[in-house]
Amino acid sequence: MMQMFKKQNEQHQAAMTVLVQAMTNKSNDESRSEITPTTSGVSQTQLMNDIGSRVAMFQFDLETEKTFSKWYARHEAAFTVERKDLEDKSKVSLLMSKMSDEVYEQYSKRICPRKHTEVEFDETVKTLEQMFDIKKSLFSHRFACINIARDDETPVENTTKVNSMCESAMSQDIDAEGWKVFFWLKGLDASRDKSTRTYFIRYVEQKWEKKESVNVNDLCEEWKKLLRQNS
């Protein structure tokens, strides 16, 4: 009889040990499940703060060639390489936080009725490139070039700016007739002749794309034709 009680007691102790171990494991699992999201959340926040502190704000300025592609090329690695484990929505939110108010407003109108958090990161980048990578025409470069002025830059910065803008304007390719055409276009009033100047800039560039020559007399005749058509 004693042996039977002893055996039952051992079995009970073994069962209690298993139960306690099971309860301990469950408690540990529950603790981990509560801690993991918090740890993950902190990690995501730390990642975003780390990137945010190193990435400059994007301000779109066509005249100074500040386009989204140039900005993103400089900071792309921060989003796609260094912090590739960052959640897609977090990357989108971080990217939006680095857009100027004007850029963000225009982008929001573009994707309406969706919110920026409803757009995937790759699509967001593609849309921003489409919106803020507008290429200036050759004459726009030349107009900007002719109005170059130093703006608190150092001698090196000013020289670099002049060199870059003149290269973009392809000033070395302008002959005497080309300069006449340029100043003919520039002489059109920016407000009163705005639509006319836009028309002739497009007219001249289309001629050049076709490898056709154009001079100020051609422009004069074209203008007179337009006036007759609109009279």
Image (cartoon, rainbow, N blue to C red):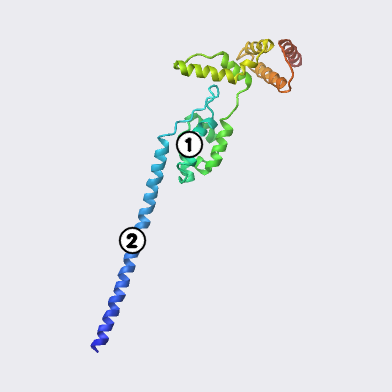
> Quick check: 217 above or below 108?
above
Q: Nearer the viewer, mark 1 or mark 2?
A: 2
State which quadrant residue 140 falls in: top right
Please say if 200 is above or below 4: above
Local crowd at mark 2 within 10 Å, few (<14), some, or many (≥20)? few
Q: Quadrant of the N terminus?
A: bottom left
Q: Position of residue 175 (x, y in %)?
A: 67, 12
Q: Distance between the residues labelled 1 and 2?
A: 39 Å
Q: Residue 1 carries which label?
A: none
Q: Tell me residue 171's x, y (percent).
A: 61, 16
What amino acid is found at the position of numbered circle 2 in the picture?
A: Asn
Mark 1 or 2, nearer chain start? 2
Say which element carries label 1.
Answer: helix
The kind of residue tagged 1 is Met
- Between 152 and 42, the one lying in front of the other is 152
**Quadrant in which the C terminus is drawn:** top right
Q: Does residue 129 appear anywhere in the picture?
A: yes
Horizontal side of 179 relative to 94 (left or right) equals right
Residue drawn at the location 54% of the way across and 41% of the way down: 122
223 to the left or right of 93:
right
Secondary structure found at label 2: helix
User: Which residue, given by chain and number where applicable, does mark 1 sit on?
Assistant: 96
Please give the name of the residue rendered at 48% of the width and 38% of the height, measured from the top-left corner: 77
Residue with the mark numbered 2: 28
Residue 47 x/y as whole percent? 41, 42
Residue 56 found in image quarter: top left
Residue 18 picture quarter: bottom left
Q: Where is residue 91 in the image (x, y as percent from the top left)?
A: 47, 41
Q: Which residue is drawn at 57% across and 16% down?
A: 145
Q: Is residue 40 left or right of residue 139?
A: left
